[in-house]
Image (cartoon, rainbow, N blue to C red):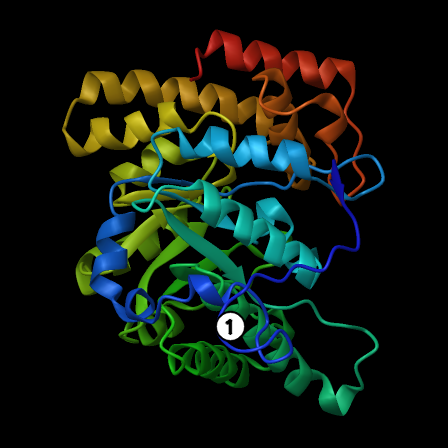
Amino acid sequence: MELSGLEIWLPGTGTKEGNTFCTWYRRITSMRDYKQIREQLTGGMIPAVPVPRSADGTIHVEAHENYAKYMAAQRIHGVALWVHTGRGLQLTRPEREYVLRCWRANLGPEQAIVAGSGSLIDPAWKAEERVKRWYASSHEMAADAMNGGADALLVFPPVIFRDLPPAERDEAIVAYHQSLADQGYPLILFYLYEEAGGVNYTLKVLERLMELSQVIGIKVATLDSVMTMQDISSLMRIHFPDKLLFTGEDRMFGYSLMRGAESALVGLGAAFPNIQADLIQAYRDRRYDQFMDLSARIDGFAEAAFVAPMDKYILRMLWCLVLAGVIPEEAAGELAGYEISQEEIDILREAITSNQLY
């Protein structure tokens, strides 16, 4: 069963033309209850989830539904949709609507949804209209997420401003986040290394963003910059202890918890999140022997799944789901067009087995 060119409309208030989708899921109160959402996400595993696709690029609906059911039964505090692992900025609007509806229907009421928010830069946009249209596209995605039942937004770095002079860039970054905060959305900042499509926010910019009351925390994904991760974690510990630090460090998972991360929002958890949930809890409970054991096993898996080309990790995680029996082989396709060899599959299988993932 596949999704191709499907228009999705769920009944709600108003007319089809006057509402985008999923109006029955609109939850104005929870949108603005930042403390409750922060507590819901604290101390937990929030896997960033991929979207299973057939060879022709369409969403494999049956596999996607099975995947959502599988993950809902795991020890997770929620999931992150429309983010990098799910190629969120490349999804069509009907695809985004379907993905969000599916997960909202399958997750329990105590499990949160964090949705990615941002926009690609359309090369067809005229130069003089580019920023305005990018803003509109980004805000459309944010509104769709919150109207569709998301609990918080993970704000993609605004790469459209990356090449501006430093002072101008910093002001533009702050103004963009302020524009989302003005809508009342609970926001999670996203520090992402540039090679993956991020922007190197200065600590001063992060301070200004953290001062926004709508910001509940930050996800940090530096990949291999220990110094940057340390600097941000120190900033959070000293100046913003009431905000959440989410680790996005697939290759520094255990260490990032030691540096103050209270929750995890990572693609590494897209197939076997329970061992990572147990790692988080072991550290919180000061069960350090168990923490060291689990951390070493998770690192062993990450060293097989998160290797160059790093962007291929999404395909690798889909194949981990195949190996786990969650989705069929024909659903392990994704938009980037990577191919996986039998040798790579065998490496993943060995990493899953030898590190006793669950």
Say which element carries label 1. helix
- Comparing 14 with 264, the one in front is 14
* Rendering quarter of residue 37: bottom left
Residue highlighted by disc 1: 143
Identify residue type, mark 1. Ala
Residue 230 x %, y % = 33, 49
**Residue 341 as seen in the image, left or right of residue 65:** right
Q: Outermost residue, bottom direction?
A: 128
- Comparing 52 with 125, the one in front is 52
Residue 266 x %, y % = 46, 41
Residue lying at 57% horizontally and 70% vertically, measured from the top left: 158
Residue 63, compared with residue 176, is above or below; it is above
* Rendering quarter of residue 231: bottom left
Residue lying at 61% horizontally and 16% vertically, measured from the top left: 323
Mark 1 neighbour class, 10 Å CA radius: few under 14, some 14 to 19, many 20 or more: some
Residue lying at 64% horizontally and 14% vertically, measured from the top left: 347
Q: Is residue 47 visible?
A: no
- Image quadrant occupied by the N terminus: top right
- Image quadrant occupied by the C terminus: top left
